[in-house]
Amino acid sequence: MGDSPLPGGGGPPGPDFGCLSSACTAAKSAVVDAANAIISKCGQVASANATAAAMLAIATAILGLVSALTGYLIGAIGVAAAIALLAAATVSLNWLLAWVIISLIATALIFLTIWAAMMIYVAVLQSQLGSLQNDFLSDVAIVKKVCPSNCWSDVDLRLPSC
């Protein structure tokens, strides 16, 4: 019967370890926050991928136009004359066409550079997404540790997918 102040040695009631305990509530809240962060990052990855695809499509269209103009120039005056024209840069309509082709190539290279930068950004976002997924799994483990199993259905413990 020992040191208990209550008759029968019962002692004071212990802390609440149920679904509404502060530890369980905080753990479930952390899981929800982590899931929302993953969903948000998935949106950022999708947006960056779409932007990169648009930049590549624009560059491809410009390079297609350059190919068509180059084909027209070579077809109109011949291979040797086209090479001589580009080398001599004579002042004529064909000279203007040569500079248009050069400008379009430079513009396409700008879009290709933007595409490459966007792909690097996508890789960084995917790395951050992986980190968020690891955090989520850690938070799920905490929920399973501090909450009774009957509380686990209160929050979705499945890893969100993109």
Image (cartoon, rainbow, N blue to C red):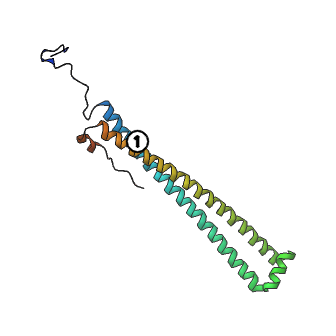
Q: Is residue 140 visible?
A: yes
Total labels drawn: 1
Q: Position of residue 60 (x, y in %)?
A: 62, 70
Position of 88 relative to 140 (above/below) = below
Q: Position of residue 100 (x, y in %)?
A: 75, 71
43 sits to left or right of 86? left
Tell me the element at label 1: helix
115 sits to left or right of 83? left
Q: Residue furthest left?
A: 8
**Crowding near the residue tagged with mark 1, few <14, some 14–19, many ≥20 C-alpha atoms within 10 Å:** some
Can you tell which quarter of the image residue 61 is in?
A: bottom right
Q: Position of residue 71 (x, y in %)?
A: 71, 81
Rendered residue at 84%/80% (across/down):
84
Can you tell which quarter of the image residue 77 is in?
A: bottom right
Which residue is the site of mark 1? 33
Residue type beneath disc 1:
Asp
